[in-house]
Image (cartoon, rainbow, N blue to C red):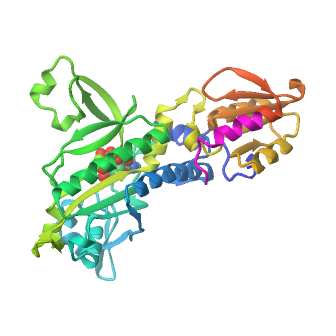
Amino acid sequence: MKYSAIFAKTTKQTPKDEVSVNAKFLLQGGYIDKLMAGSYTLLPLGRRVERKIEQIIRTEMDKTGAQEVLMPLLHPKEIWNETGRWETAREVMYQFEKNDKSYALSFTHEEIVMDLIRKHVSSYKDLPVKLYHFSTKFRNELRAKSGILRGREFLMKDLYSAHASKEDMTHYYWQVADAYTRAFEKIGLKTIIAEAAGGVFTSEHTHEFQVEAESGEDTIYLAPGWKYAKNKEIMTDEDMARSDVKAITSIEVGNIFPLGLMYSEKMEVMFTDKDGRRKPIWLASYGIGPTRVLGTIVEVSHDGRGIIWPVSVAPYVVHIVSINQDAGALHDKLSSKGVDVLYDDRDAGAGEKLSDADLLGMPVRLVVSAKNAGKIEWKERQTADTELLTEDEVVKRLQELQRSTVTL
Ligand code: ATP
Ligand code: MG
């Protein structure tokens, strides 16, 4: 891809009200654009990263046997009344009236999934059901101060599983937890599982996938001997008093909920079991926010000059900077070999191109210059070292690296 052709270039300006690192670099890099607080466009570069993140998550979800769907975002009030959430979730939900009918914009999908299940499941033979989708969520977030980490409109992958027994639900729940850990690892994030309270929806603990980050809004606690970290809200006085408890700030990138029977009982979602009896189904739900994940990578992987993308989700694996010379032939060659390549073909100064390459954060930077006597300068974003390589060596190395990124 030629940089001159990409919609939205780097800029030195950022909106005054943006304080977070992710918003600053993503806005300056032309990865996102801000419409209003908590509402962003993913520009072509940002969308490429998000699509790679999405593809890694999708692959892991499919491996658990889940099936992808796409559910509506416009919901009638009646469905939310069945569980009482039209009232209890009023603060977070965008609700409105049109032609004397009341609607809400999707902030989650448990009720919608349960409606699907009661229409399409009748017997234990139809269970388990594992459905997920990637779509927009709307939430009336009051603290929309963390850039793309906390949108009022954001992307979520939400998975819902329905089971004939608690045992089956629990078994699948931990299978998904493993799939989450693997997906985050591939994305380049190390996650810590933290237990959290289930709130009004379940007496069981839920589990959050947390990434340690100075800028995180959450605090979790770790202690020797604990299998999982703990969220602040479930720390007892005794836990707090331990001298070996360590508190860290973190960003929640995923959350899984063993919801149990509450939804099926309220919405009468039943199945006929082997013994011929009608029983309520067991429900669990699982969420990851791909746009928050994108922002989290920037929060934990940057330096003073810009973003440092992990190869797996980098929009392009390599960024070519040419100095007083045309590098179109190298771009075309790499591109024809299937390498995700970005070529800064602008008529701009070397300093500007090099600092833009640091801001944009592709894993490898190549400098093509008459000074290099026919060789190409290779530099990896996270290190200061440079090497001079032949074109064949460059092609070979990049083809190797390309295997570690998602193919779009
Ligand atoms: P938080 O406690 O951070 O507000 P939550 O617990 O309300 O999040 P969940 O309902 O568990 O969020 O949503 C599942 C996932 O969706 C989260 O783990 C996160 O990755 C993402 N997510 C939630 N809220 C937002 C938001 N406002 N903006 C971007 N991503 C979000
Ligand atoms: Mg959560």
Q: Position of residue 48 (x, y in %)?
A: 59, 51
Q: Between residue 264 and residue 63, name the one nearer to us.
A: 63
Q: Where 196 falls versus 100 (above or below)?
A: above
Furthest-bottom residue in this view = 99
> Which image quarter holds the C terminus?
bottom right
Furthest-top residue in this view = 243
Q: Between residue 176 and residue 358, name the one nearer to us.
A: 176
| Residue positioned 27% across, 72% down in the render | 126
Q: Where 195 falls versus 86 (above or below)?
A: above
Q: Where 279 falls versus 242 (above or below)?
A: below
**Is residue 141 visible in this depiction of the protein?**
no
Lateral position of residue 201 relative to residue 181, left or right:
left
**Which range of residues does the magenta coloring cover?**
394-408
Q: Position of residue 317 (x, y in %)?
A: 65, 40
| Residue positioned 38% across, 61% down in the render | 66
Lateral position of residue 24 relative to residue 8, left or right:
left
Hey, which quadrant is residue 281 in on the image? bottom left
Lateral position of residue 346 relative to residue 250, left or right:
right
Q: Position of residue 52 (x, y in %)?
A: 54, 50
| Residue positioned 82% across, 41% down in the render | 330
Hey, which quadrant is residue 276 in on the image? bottom left
Q: Is residue 398 magenta?
A: yes
Q: Between residue 44 and residue 379, name the one nearer to us.
A: 379
Q: Is residue 299 magenta?
A: no
Q: Between residue 86 and residue 99, name the one nearer to us.
A: 86
Q: Position of residue 82 (x, y in %)?
A: 18, 71
Hey, which quadrant is residue 404 in on the image? top right
